[in-house]
Amino acid sequence: MRFRRARPDEPAAAPRGNASRMLIAALAGAGAVLAFAPFGYWPLQIASLAILFYQMLRGAGAKAAFGIGWAYGAAWFGAGMYWLFISMHRYGAMAAPLAALAVLLLAALMGLYVGLAMAAAAWLRRRWSLSLPLMNLLALPAIWMLQEWCRGWFFTGLPWVISGYAHNASPLAGYAPLLGVYGLGWLAAVCAGALLLLGHRSRLPAAALIVLVGAAGYGLRFVEWTHPVGRPISVRLLQGNVPQDEKFDPARVGAALEMYRAAILAAPADLIATPETAVTVFPHQLPPDYLPSLERFARETDSNLLLGMPLLDYPQVANSAVGITPQAGAPRYRYDKHHLVPFGESTPDGLHWLVAAMAIPLGDLKRGAAVQPPFQVDGQRVLPNVCYEDLFGEEIAAQLAAAHHAGQQSASILINMSNLAWFGDSTAIPQHLQISQMRSLETGRPMLRAGNSGGSAVIDGHGKILSALPAQSRATLAANVQGMGGMTPYILCGNVLILAIVALSLGGAGLRARRNRKHRAFAL
């Protein structure tokens, strides 16, 4: 029988079984949620990753590493998105046991990303005989970033509670205009790997690396990637706080329509915006004087209106933002939601039975174009994104870059129109607000948010919340907003730069490991 002699830089063999390591990993994954909004204890995200990496490194092969990673990922996603149960059960009319099972199954599926990543890392370490520094600083961070990136596009993507979002206010935030949210997750993994080396003979370089990454990120916060354009515009963001179980009730639709009309007519502004589907019926189903009265108000007060409403392109329906300008006879602006929510707004073939188990209105929608023009508002160009769409920073960046490459002026202000009443008074609202802050950091542009039940806010081009409305309240947020122009590296490159960095990291780890093997063979 042959035994492999452990390298001196390997962690000692773990006495405990894999089940206990999976439990520790699960606790670390669930605890990572405290790093995100509304809690904001961002160091916990790095510590959580360090625990995951430590447990994986002490495992016995790819199979054990898969179990450890899966436990972490499933607990992380389940704790981060527990509020899906509220949408399915309370508002989707799905039986509680079935809704709970659906959330658990989804968490289990999401856990596969981390499980497969840790299995790949364990296999790669054994295959390449990677030293601990190479593993912790090159291979593991690269593999971690790749699994998060895959989660952002595979099966249309579900990049909620991606690790980089925890760092919108940490020293790593300075890297967002260069590397985007996935780059921040990669840097957090580098710091986690370096943290584990503080008990290794490489402790001094590891400590220096942590300090350098943090200091450079802090310094980058002072780089002005974008610049003011035009004059500031006045905005009014309406938060109707219409309960989700009343929103599409035919007996209550009229009251909601009148409430929003009164809120719009209350005062003029350069831009007045409603939440997603504030108007819940098609234009031809509205009272005859509804849109004409809003158009008269826009002309008489020199206001621009942006209304969230569904539009019928028979036989399809679009989740849209409709713009009304002060110019008499001008065509209405239209933005159609492009990135649709799986099962909530688009249903894959063969899975309509799942949507049928929930009472979800507007459940199978038409997809808008990937690149759409912004809404012109007094010299500013306002680009909408509807609810879930602002999870996909690369798509927003691509819209800005497309205008730049075409020789046109890109949008100077972003606006998110959302309805998170589906998720009650949960962490979904502050988490979504944090996501919008990351989009501002990546693009250097202000983000306006008009939410139905909360999350209405004005965020500047540095990701700072300038003003916000309390959740679960009916109110209007008034502010002056300065548009920004110019291109951040992330707008121009998207995720290409961070993908190139992780490719070089993996390639460098492989080449260094190969050189080490040759050196050992020569010494023998």
Image (tube, rainbow, N blue to C red):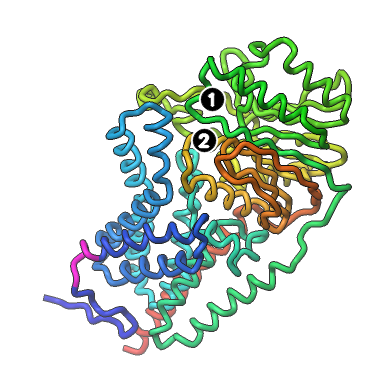
User: Left of 391 or right of it: where is 323?
Assistant: right
- Queried whether the magenta region covers residue 89, the answer comes back as no
Q: Earlier in the sequence, mark 2 or mark 1?
A: 1
Label 1, on which residue? 247
Give x and y (percent) for residue 289.
Answer: 75, 12
Give whichever of 62, 521 is nearer the camera. 62
Is 17 covered by the magenta stretch?
yes
Would you name the residue on which mark 2 appears? Answer: 421
Q: Are marks 2 and 1 in contact (CB under 8 Å)?
A: yes
Splitting the image into 4 quarters, where does residue 295 fall?
Answer: top right
Q: What is the three-letter code of the residue carrying label 1?
A: Lys
Where is the C terminus found, in terms of image quarters?
A: bottom left
Dominant SS in magenta:
helix
Q: Nearer the viewer, residue 136 or 214?
A: 214
The number of callouts visible is: 2
* Figure check: 239 above or below 427: above
At 60% from the left edge and 69% from the top edge, which residue is drawn?
171
Q: Which residues are magenta?
A: 16-20
Amino acid type for the residue under numbered disc 2: Ala
Numbered disc 2: secondary structure:
helix
